[in-house]
Image (cartoon, rainbow, N blue to C red):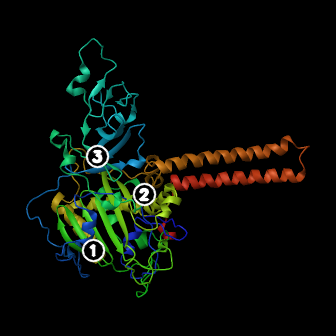
Amino acid sequence: MEALRAPSFPSFHLSVLPTRFHTRSYDKPLLHLPFNPLLNSSFSSICGNFSKSKPCTARSSASSSEAMDLPRPSHHGEEKFDWFSQWYPVAPVCDLDKRKPHSKRVIGLDVVVWWDRNESEWKVFDDACAHRLAPLSEGRIDQWGRLQCVYHGWCFNGSGDCKFIPQAPPDGPPVHTFKKARATVYPSAVQHGIVWFWPNTDPQFKDIFTKKRPPYIPELDDLSYTKSMGARDFPFGYEILMENVMDPAHVAYAHYGIMQIPQAKDRPKADREGGTPIEISVKRSAIDGFDAERELARSKFIPPCLYYTCLDFPAYQSNESVSSGLTKEEPSSHMSPKRALLILICVPVSPGNSRLIWTFPRNFGLWTDHIIPRWMLHMSQNLILDSDLYLLHLEERKIMKAGPSNWHKACFVPTKSDAHIVAFRAWLRKYSGGQLDWGTNFSSALPPTPPREQLMDRYWSHVVNCSSCSVAYKGLQVLEVVLQIFSIALIGIPVINHGVMSVAARITAVSMAILCFAASRWLSYFIYKTFHFHDYTHAFC
């Protein structure tokens, strides 16, 4: 989902990649990518071995989404998906500060993530102190490496045991050892640079990591692949986010003017944006997700959070560097194939809110990640994310008005390009009653719509939680102040030394002052557009 381009190797786009898969022109450069995931079997084996069951087809004369002839699910009973017996990603490790606790909400649960230096592990607790339910995420890590509640100073170790209650008399009963003094601890683990947690504190799940692990993708542990990650919160729900990342057909239109979409030479453009038919077939659908294929690409949905696409390119011998992309030269048996993965983790936060964690590992053009700062990649990605954020927020409200269980009646999806979305909604309807199960945490009501600038705010949805962007934000703010100070100082120099400085020197100083002031104003505008709010009006693109 990036619009950033390197000199000879294009950046990778969160939404761009799917649309490129159907192009037949091999002389176009690849997109830019940066993400992580689940599954007990390896990603590689999935990429190479998809089910051979009947593909999904679509008829243009259909009157509803039921026109899509989806393959029959392999589970015929009343089996339901248990949303609270799954691994959920909390945050990328690269964006977590070990010096302080972090507040997160996942599937309606408020949790605190903190680094236990005594056990050298990330821990996930319920974000409530046993004392009077104050948020532990507002606390601190004390000098002994314990999580301290900042309200009354109660301290907890990595196992949740209360180790110290300042208000308890030393010679009194050891109230800190009482069971009710314990913090609530969730099973947690780190895989592929992401902290995962199991949203159930039942003792039977204490060692769940040894029985069922978060999804595993070998490429994310392979040093020959790039692994840049990003995350952002959205003001629309999990279902809408999942639909959007599965939809390659929207890229040419919703992100027009931001990304360049290559066109197949044997297919004329039907409109300015260059949208084309996309042949997608769903090969298998079951309670554990579904597989799909389209030209040059294979995709998989693994509930609850993961959607990924695997793209293998043949190796080509050419005088051009690897970073120049695919060429028309003949494949070379002496070169390993290029592989790019688009990995998207859609995290349910609360009704009307979701979180996306992304990474686009690839085994070519690795040098771009070493010279382009991560915050610049996120700048481009956020621009793309912003371009359809507002319409998705409104779309969700229209779907909720019709009723989630009536999605297949309210929406008309007659083409094969919507096969992913139809398969996802069919899966959701069969195994979860058409919507995510929040348990007793929330009702299904959506929060009110805030003003557009607040809705599309980047700072609280991304910057404050991103280690790279937050550092860049603070650094640029300092530079802005320095430029303003310089402009004032340069104006003062000719005034103080009026009788000493020559006319040329005074003119030079004033000119430099004006340039510094202008640069500070431009930088202020850049900071606001990059880290706070960047509107996107489709009518003028």
Q: Which numbered marker is on residue 293?
A: 1
**How far apart are labels 2 and 3 at the CA level?**
20 Å
Three-letter code, disc 1: Glu
Q: Quadrant of residue 300?
A: bottom left
Q: Please give left or right for residue 180 compared with residue 374 in the image.
A: left
Sequence-first disc among 2 and 1: 2
Q: Which sits in the foreground, 96 or 47?
A: 47
| Extreme residue toward the right, this view | 499
Q: Quadrant of residue 204?
A: top left
Q: Which residue is mark 2?
A: 228
**How far apart are labels 2 and 1 at the CA level?**
26 Å
Q: What x and y, as percent, mark residue 329?
A: 44, 84
Q: Quadrant of residue 263?
A: bottom left
Q: Residues within 10 Å of mark 1 (few under 14, many from 20)?
A: many
Q: Which sits in the foreground, 329 or 91?
A: 329
Q: What x and y, as percent, mark residue 480?
A: 63, 48
**How far apart are labels 3 and 1 at the CA level?**
32 Å
Secondary structure type for disc 3: strand
Q: Is residue 366 above or below residue 454?
A: below
Q: Please give left or right for residue 305 compared with residue 326 in the image.
A: left
Q: Which sits in the foreground, 141 or 69?
A: 141
Residue at 25 percent of width and 46 percent of height = 442
Q: Is residue 133 visible?
A: yes
Sequence-first disc among 2 and 3: 3
Whether label 3 touches label 1, CB < 8 Å: no
